[in-house]
Amino acid sequence: INSNRYFFMLLPLIYLILVNTITSFVTRYTNIRILKNIIIKKQEYRQVYDNLIQLRGKSSKSVEYYSVESKYDDDDDLFDEDDELVKDMKRNDHEWMFFDVAKISVKGGDGGDGCMAMRREFRLDQGGPSGGNGGHGGSVYLVCDDTINTLAPLRRRVHHKAGDGTNGKGDSRHGRKGDDVYIPVPPGTIVRDDQGVLAGELNRPGQKLIVSRGGRGGRGNEHFKTPRMTAPAFCERGELGHERWLNVELKLVADVGFVGVPNAGKSTLLAASSNAKPKIADYPFTTIVPNLGVCDVDGTANGEGKGLVLADIPGLLEGAHDGVGLGLAFLRHIQRCKVILHVIRGDSNDPIGDFEAINQELSLFNPRLLDKPQVVVVNKIDIPEVRDKLPQLIDDLRASAGHTRVLGISAVTGENVRDLMRRMRRFMDSLPVQSQLTSELFTDEEDRVDFDAQEDSEFEVFTDDNYPHQFRVVGKKLERLVRMTNWDYFESLLRFQRILEAEGVVAELKSRGAVEGDLIMIDEFDFDFIDRKNRWMSELGLENVKPRRRPKAGEY
């Protein structure tokens, strides 16, 4: 008896020991698996990073960069943002360093529903309709903001939705309008719809572009009150806000854009002429994202100092217009520059060949780039071999370029750099105003879409021989009418029928052969075709009676 009593006393202790052992084993097994996954993923990322470093060290013209963005994710809880490997990979990834393309979803706010109410008060007979209108939905705007220079905020937040309007209420109380949403974007932003059709561009600070219009608020029964219809007993539903995907692209707006082959000294020239601190090294493809700088120029013709906005475009390769070496990502920024500064590598084996190759890439990407004014500079004249052949090289470049705007500089020592900037300022001041417009990127023939355009009243009727007695009516105005009609009220149905007759839909269906009982489809709703005139005429037995014209005075 005593031994059994001791056994039952020890049983809870044995149970706790067993549970702790099992829990410890499961936890250790889980931690081992997590650690193993972390090691495997870090090995994969390290391999991708090593490949990127190897490619960046090469100077072949056929180099194509890897994008490691798909290899890691901000939402991966296994990796700490403070991890040195992740930081190093982000520093060397052009997608993390510069955001010039984004795809966002915008949705306008839904309109509020109208109210159907009658005024009922003490000692007030036949108060009449008092239903208020619903509030309009908010709209989504893109606003040009010169304090930002990338599309990084749009990459971090993809979905943007405006506020909904509130419903109308009785006693003639209207709903509140939804809040608008303003999305800041940098100057030089181009907006296209999901089909690639141009919607607009934003260049001036404070410029706004509506990209998603809010839905119209439904009207209450008080709105429909007329001398003939003194007590309407119906209202409208609120219109849904417009929703769409947008392709947003940034093309830097700069006065001067530096172009040239890799390792020509463009970043060194930017650092020597401005306070910008781009990455500079003695191997090609050091710059993999565009850099901006501002040069304060003095000694202009009017005696006032004017700044130059400079854009350092990464080095271009042969085949850049086809995407080689991220060429498409870099060439788009040259379109916004007002003047192209072509930097020639003085110690190149074939400087004239490099000059002609870059110009050919510009023309293949966009022929209108050749119309931009261009200035040519020969860099690295601090090298004795380059200085010796500089006069002959300048003559050859002038003959190839077709103008005399050629100068020798040394970005490392600063020789002729300030003189170059002064000449650039005077040259830009002498250009016509039309040549400095950035809106000349697009041709007049290019299709454009207007997100704020009002819906027209045109419609089309479609039939299919395989499905007789079925008709599909397509039209934006009619589809919006169907969605906003409140089918809970009988008078709404009568109003809908009157609108179809007034818009000519009934007449068009009759001309297409629609008869009583045919299926009519509008948007997501199906209706039975009813010819009200013929129906009442047949019931009264007047279908064979021909109407007569009322005689005028004196015609009896």
Image (spheres, helix red, strand yellow):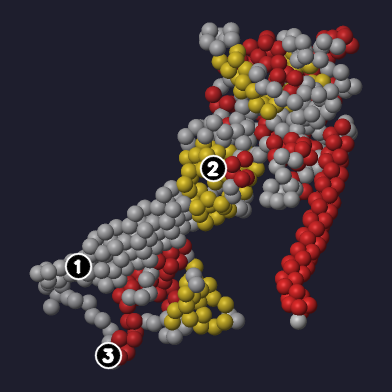
Query: What residue is rendered at 67% in x and 10% in y?
Result: 418
Which residue sits furthest front?
2
Q: Which residue is mark 3?
A: 540
Residue 156 at what x, y percent from top left?
61, 45
Residue 200's disc is 2
Query: What residue is rendered at 66% in x and 33% in y?
Result: 333
Q: Is residue 227 left or right of residue 486?
A: left
Task: Please identify the quadrant where the C terminus is shown.
Answer: bottom left
Amino acid type for the residue under numbered disc 3: Leu
Amino acid type for the residue under numbered disc 2: Gly
Which residue sits furthest left?
123
Q: Which residue is mark 1?
A: 119
Task: Please identify the quadrant where the N terminus is shown.
Answer: bottom right
Cα separation, mark 2 vs mark 1, equals: 48 Å
Residue 9 at what x, y percent from top left?
72, 73
| Helix, strand or loop status at disc 1 | loop
Residue 467 sits above or below residue 89 on the image: below
Q: Quadrant of residue 278?
A: top right
Amino acid type for the residue under numbered disc 1: Arg
| Helix, strand or loop status at disc 2 | strand
Q: Quadrant of residue 272?
A: top right
Mark 2 surroundings: few (<14), some (14-19) or many (≥20) residues within 10 A: some
Q: Is residue 291 left or right of residue 300?
A: right
Residue 324 visible in image: no
Residue 38 visible in image: yes
Earlier in the chain: of badge 3 and badge 2, it is 2
